[in-house]
Image: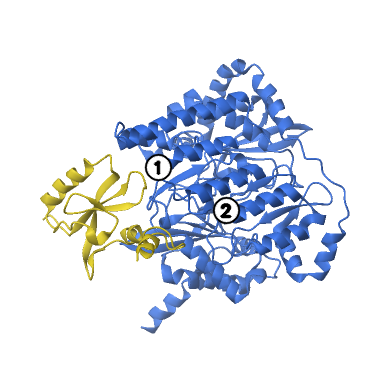
Amino acid sequence: MYTYSEFDSAFVAERNRQFRAQVERRIDGSLTEDEFKPLRLMNGLYLQLHAYMLRVAIPYGTLNSRQMRQLAMIAERWDKGYGHFTTRQNIQFNWPNLANVPDILEALAKVEMHSIQTSGNTIRNVTADHFAGAAADEVADPRPVAELIRQWSTDHPEFQFLPRKFKVGVTGSPNDRAVTASHDIGLRIIERNGEIGYRVLVGGGLGRTPMIGKVLADFLPEADLLPYIEAVVSVWNLLGRRDNKFKSRIKITVHEHGIDEIRTRVEKHFAIIKPSFAGIDQQMLAAIRADFAAPAFLTASETPYTHARQHDPVFRSWADTNLSEHRVPGYAIVSISLKAHGKTPGDASAHQMRLMAELAERYGHDELRISHEQNVILPHVHKSFVPSVFAALRAAGLGTANIGLISDIIACPGMDYCALATARSIPIAQQIATRFDELKLEYEIGEMKIKISGCINACGHHHVGHIGILGLDRAGVENYQITLGGDHRTDARLGDRTGPGFAADEIVPAIERIVYAYLDLRTAPSETFLAAYQRLGLAPFKAALYKTEAQAYAAE
Amino acid sequence: MSREFTPKVITANALIEGDVVYFTAHDTWSRALQDADVLTDEADAALRLLIAEARNDEVVGAYLAEMKPGADGPDPVHFREEFRRTGPSNLFHGKQADIASRA
């Protein structure tokens, strides 16, 4: 993976020195909150409901064991012994004390991490496929270009005061696992006639006004990428609405001006700036690529794996759900579920972080990934090691066999932590997971993506959940709206709103009604919920969802 | 016709710790809602908020939060304020844990 150059280290150290002085000036009263707030946000420090929250970037979700151990150390020394992995592949610490944040940032810098541009109206942490470099279906590893974009966008002088935040997601696989269609810019690495290039999507986004990204360039040659996306951000920087926060994202700019008008402007600006790039970006990309060279894969017998599969049904069940196909024979991608039934989605204790670091170091070529689905991935594990990995995970409460199932829920922090939230998310996720575990229906239901957001900003991606749940404040009471049929993959689709929302104590039975309707309606167990929904549409699910109420009215 | 003024307390987050604090009748900040000065007069509340906001080197984001009379001092009207005075519901952290550790 990428390692810091002298320039990177010096830049981060200087920013940390500046922020330490800014914190000191805030504490001694030289800076007011109005003056300090933009400075702390530039360094990922929020003030939430109960405490400060520090959001640390995990670039494109990739980290090594040393970095994971340092996150564990920070969690224990300066927080409450755990961290929360987010839908943007970052980690958040929920309880830091302002006076300690400069020390935390210094500890992060020691392992080449920081919080720069994890907040504010800047280009945020670039996200990527969490199976990058490992997936069997991959055209090219998306991380080198994600790293190039990270370097280009970090402290980019033109893009420090954008109309609003700007998010870039990259996939290197035709099966999009990075939700690129919901990003301001979504990049899909594709191959055409033996040449690698990019399909560029623009104007995707969830939130208040959800939009699926539109194709701005169908096939962009590799050498054009950086000047092209610079042109996109430049065009939006001038055109984007600064008069209305709710209309400032590029999705609205694209919507208001039309994709063709945006394309014309981008191409015009691209023609102007392209000569100034002069190939240096491609030299940098080549150097970065070398940093992401594949590990020295092992050749070994798979017998321990096949033996465990044959003789240990618990292992087999976990392997069936939590392993994905690796591009190298004999290897597997291990998804570690941070969704133990009844626990908080995305939370990991310091002890668990250390264990995952150890497993990565010992069995996984020292690589870890964070998925936008709030799980941790060991991307390169030889199958002979998988039984040992599972045994260690299980002992640490990390052996839940539920990847892609109904309890593998995305949930934003919601009103348990977030100052913007209008309702809680986490307890709803906990209750749904616990309920379906009790019913022992998870495996029968099969693939199911429930995504929960505690406000319209949609950090929990509810619009693209097979079942999406949005928590709102309805006249001072938590109320949950349901959407159905959303899809986060390549042909992304926004879910359909079912109708009136449900109170907190009605939402789990409501989800049950939808699930039972699906089990009744599907043609065969192989027909997933999403496939059944696509075949049947909203009507039968809506009827089942509101059945109880309709019957109650009828009885009156 | 203007709406009747409902009781309020001044609340904010502490500058260093970031936790929830309430403004008392003695112009100090308390971690406990029952210590808060309950304001029942609109003009008084506006003035008290100005005084609290001036304490910019102690707290962040002072505002008036609506309350109703409870068994042990004011009770929040809105569930958001209930979470602020208690802590998160998924983990026993924040105020609920602080109160338990003091008891």
Question: Would you say residue A125 is visible in this rendering?
Answer: no
- Which label was assigned to residue A39? none
User: Residue A310, position in %: x, y?
Assistant: 83, 68
Q: Which residue is mark 2?
A: A350
Residue farthest to the bottom, as pictured: A555
Q: Residue A276 appears in which quarter of the rendering?
A: top right
User: Residue A166, position in %: x, y?
Assistant: 50, 36
Q: Which residue is mark 1?
A: A98
**Along the line of sight, the residue nearer the viewer: A37 or A485:** A37
Which residue type does callout 1 highlight?
A: Leu
**Along the line of sight, the residue nearer the viewer: A460 or A94:** A94
Query: Cα distance, mark 2 to mark 1?
Result: 21 Å
Number of on-image labels? 2
In the picture, one chain is yellow; tell me its letter. Answer: B
Q: Earlier in the sequence, mark 2 or mark 1?
A: 1
A115 in relation to A301, above or below: above
Question: Would you say residue A443 is visible in this rendering?
Answer: yes
Indicate the colouring scheme.
by chain
User: Residue A38, position in %: x, y?
Assistant: 38, 34
Q: Regarding mark 2 in the picture, which secondary structure is present there?
A: helix
How crowded pointer 2 is (Cα within 10 Å; few <14, some 14-19, many 20+) is rated as many
Image-based side of A487 in relation to A190, left or right:
left
Chain bearing tag 1 is A
Q: Residue B9 appears in which quarter of the rendering?
A: bottom left
Which residue type does callout 2 highlight?
A: Ala
A112 in relation to A373, above or below: above
In the picture, one chain is blue; tell me its letter. Answer: A
How crowded pointer 1 is (Cα within 10 Å; few <14, some 14-19, many 20+) is rated as many
